[in-house]
Amino acid sequence: MDQAMIVKTSSGRVSGIRVENVHAFLGVPFAAPPFGEHRFRPPTPPEPWEGVRPAVEHGPAAPQRPAQDIGLFAPDVFRYGADCLNLDVHTPDPGAAGLPVLVWFHGGAFSVGANSAAWQRGHRFARDGVVCVAVNYRLGFEGFLALDDVPANLGVLDWLAALRWVRANIAAFGGNPADVTIAGQSAGGAAVATLMTMPDAAGLFRRAIVMSGSATLVTSLAEARAQAKELAAVLGVRPVREDFAALPPERLLAEQPPPTTGQLGSLGESVAIKPVVDGQVVPGVPLEAIAAGIGGHLRLLAGNTSQEADVFVRRMVEGIDQGTAREAAEALGFSSDPEPPPAELVARAVTHRLFIRETRLLLRARSAAIAPTYAYEFRWESPLESPAGGGRVGAVHNLDLPFVFDVLDAPGVARTAGHHAPQALAHEMHGAWVRFVRDGDPGWPAGVKRILR
């Protein structure tokens, strides 16, 4: 890796590195560190700096609990710290002009994750002519706690601040600020669906990609305020900024619930922390707004994997009998003919309820949209057995990421997908996403689901 050229941003100059013949600018701040005087407050611009700031290492992620390693996915260990409102930019050429831009929001149930995740790095989008920006934002209680005297959606305001930074600065990296596509997977996909309906985000992007996401992953202001009050009682403080800002982040993390609750009735029940319908930043439930035509001028690509949660659920319900499995599936609104073995039946029902159903609701809500909607389903199944139990990995949640980013050589892919994952499928998917970002058309007819396997 050799030195990249210097780019001038609105806060100062940055120098990056070369990665596989593209330019990478890593850990670039788009807002001031959200701690100290800025803790539990909306994002503010970063302090300008003199000279040239090195942008050669991934910036810190937001404070979070380490994710449990269950033998699947990339073995990422994220460094976190105060200066967590940063982004990575991969560009073919900072001296170019008018290149399409992809802005990526990582998943992690709004509680874990980082833009530096190995399966989501944008250097091969840059290789193919796209300026790729990956965003860090506040997570967990720091980003979504609804204190009495604090805006309820600080993490959402971080998304907006990042998009405004892109609009103001991306031309200096060769990108076109008028040709931005936002994309995300899992909670990142829910972030994209939410942004599509937010008045403050209007005009900041023109296309959207929702991968394994949801347009219902929000909570009410009343529920969010109640959660904050319960937490304050546990901590022995008032539910106000002054008291919570005096607590170390580690104290809040100790009381923060796991990213997923284990409740399988709906995706909203299974995710403990999420954006808040506050009537202002997030005016309403995104699905309802989309059905009413909000965001209908935006081209959308949306889909999911076919076995998102199967391996995890099979492990949880191992030994269940057929009658109990059938009752559980019926309670989740799922039936299958022929009926698979008990654990498999429940697994399919949960995947359908938590992910496939959410994608279908989003696609159905878009039925009257002005702009076209493109659907896909990822069905390639990993042949490996899960080391944690539950049988074959299959087309599990997250497995489509290294295909979309064309990084089958990234850490952790082989232990999840095996050593012979089809590079041809990665070329197909990555190429489709590049075409959508560049032209608004992934290469198949709108309204027709593309099966990827």
Image: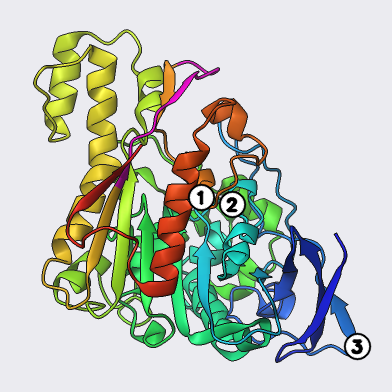
Q: Amino acid at mark 3?
A: Gly
Q: Amino acid at mark 2?
A: Gly
**What label sits on residue 113 in the rendered view?**
2
Q: Which of the two residues, 407 or 105, is positioned nearer the viewer here?
A: 407
Identify the residue shown where x is 52% and y is 75%. 101
Q: Where 24 falls versus 359 (above or below)?
A: below
Residue 135, position in %: x, y? 59, 67
Q: Nearer the viewer, mark 1 or mark 3?
A: 3
Q: Quadrant of the C terminus?
A: top left
Q: Count neighbours of disc 3 (C-alpha within 10 A) and say few if under 14, some if 14 to 19, many if 20 or more.
A: few
Q: Amino acid at mark 1?
A: Gly
Q: Is residue 2 left or right of residue 136?
A: right
Which type of secondary structure does the marked residue at label 2 adopt? loop
Task: Please tell me in which quadrant of the rendered image residue 438 appears.
Answer: bottom left
Pick whichever of labels 2 and 1 is earlier in the sequence.
1
Residue at which label 3 appears: 51
Residue 78 colored magenta?
no
Residue 114, position in %: x, y? 62, 55
Pick whichever of labels 1 and 3 is earlier in the sequence.
3
Residue at which label 1 appears: 108
Question: Label 1 near label 2: C-beta < 8 Å?
Answer: yes
Which residue sits furthest right?
51
Q: Quadrant of the N terminus?
A: bottom right
Task: Please tell me in which quadrant of the rendered image residue 301 appears.
Answer: bottom left
The part of the chain drawn in magenta is 377-389
Residue 384 colored magenta?
yes
Identify the residue shown where x is 19% and y is 59%. 363
Q: Is residue 164 left or right of residue 306?
A: right
Residue 406, position in %: x, y? 55, 49
Mark 2–mark 1 Cα distance, whole angstroms, equals: 5 Å
